[in-house]
Image (spheres, grey):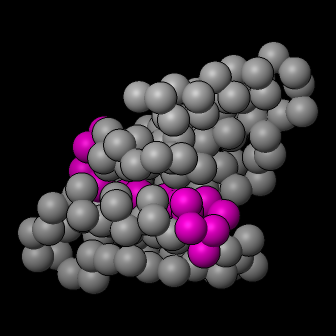
Amino acid sequence: MRLVIGSDHAGWPLKQTVIDHIRKLGHDIVDVGSHDDKPVDFPDIARAVAQKVTSGEAARGIMVCGTGVGASIAANKMKGIRAAVCHDVHSAHQSVEHDDVNVMCIGAQIVGAWLAVDLVSSYLSAEFSTDEDFRRRVEKLRVMDEQG
């Protein structure tokens, strides 16, 4: 799977651990920044991640910031994005299975490297359910996204 990852300065220290794990799992990864610990604005990075996902250049995205919350808010402003903050393994896979999440946001100030690796594995191994109820609900989200 081709993935895109981004971080702000608060998430930058954890991002390389996540990238290394993704590559170890055999996935391709595009890093849209940041590339050091100098302050950046997370909405700019979230936009870059979202654009790679909505354009089809990446199947899914990952954002790493301080808490994951700001990144999730910013990514969800982009049409076609369903982003979720995931700080536990269950949410990391269920968000994909039930809600077809295409951007997972994690907080480097909340989770450590070991948990981040488990979250990524769970997120990437999950597939959107074929259950009619989940499909119907995600279609309603798509309509909301279109209509505002």
Q: Residue at x 29, y 55 (%)?
A: 65
Q: Is residue 120 magenta?
A: no
**Magenta stretch bounds:** 53-70
Vertical order, 2 against 101 (above or below): below
Residue 82 at x, y percent in the picture:
53, 41
In the rendered structure, the answer to whether residue 132 lies left or right of residue 96 reads right
Residue 84 at x, y percent in the picture:
48, 38
| Residue in the foreground of this view, choosing between 124 and 118 | 124
| Residue in the foreground of this view, choosing between 14 and 64 | 64
Q: Residue at x 76, y 46 (%)?
A: 126
Vertical order, 15 against 135 (above or below): below
Looking at this view, name the residue that lies furthest to the front: 147
In the rendered structure, the answer to whether residue 101 lies left or right of residue 65 reads right
Residue 8 at x, y percent in the picture:
24, 64
Q: Quadrant of residue 47?
A: bottom left
Q: Quadrant of residue 90?
A: top right
Q: Residue at x 80, y 45 (%)?
A: 127
Q: Residue at x 40, y 49 (%)?
A: 78
